Amino acid sequence: MRYHSIIGHLDPEVPLTKSDDGLVPYWSAHLDGAASEKIVRSTHSVQGTAPAIIEMRRILHEDIRDRATVPVGAAGCGWQLL
């Protein structure tokens, strides 16, 4: 299963590996094997920021494009994109 990560980085003066979003440290939020990782200057509520929203749209558009090129049934779902 593909997964992506969008991580808040509260203080840009702090090195990424030692940073946090005010709640979760980067080392805990980072997921090895993620298809992409976007670091956004933000608190823990990163999902409400413009850069995170743009990244979510990018990921969703990529998924739609990828599913449109997969034969019916190969995507593991019971429906077909037209």
Image (cartoon, rainbow, N blue to C red):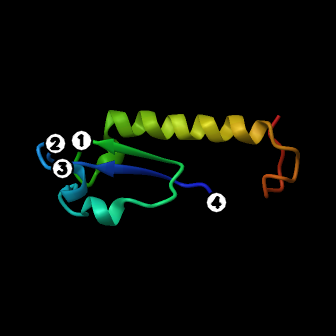
> Which SS class for mark 3?
loop
Amino acid type, callout 4? Met
Q: Which mark is residue 41?
A: 1
Of mark 2 and mark 4, the one earlier in the sequence is 4
Task: Quickly name the residue at label 4.
Answer: 1
The span from disc 2 to disc 1 (Cα, nearest Å) is 7 Å
The span from disc 3 to disc 1 (Cα, nearest Å) is 12 Å
Closer to the eye: label 3 or 2 = 3
Q: Quadrant of the N terminus?
A: bottom right
Of mark 3 and mark 4, the one earlier in the sequence is 4
Task: Quickly name the residue at label 3.
Answer: 15
- Percent across and percent down for residue 27 are 30, 63
Question: Residue at horizontal 32%, vertical 66%?
Answer: 28
Question: Residue at horizontal 24%, vertical 41%?
Answer: 41
Task: Quickly name the residue at label 2.
Answer: 12
The span from disc 3 to disc 2 (Cα, nearest Å) is 7 Å
Q: Is residue 54 left or right of residue 17?
A: right
> Which SS class for mark 1?
loop
Closer to the eye: label 2 or 1 = 2
Amino acid type, callout 3? Pro
Mark 4 surroundings: few (<14), some (14-19) or many (≥20) residues within 10 A: few
Q: Are marks 2 and 1 in contact (CB under 8 Å)?
A: yes
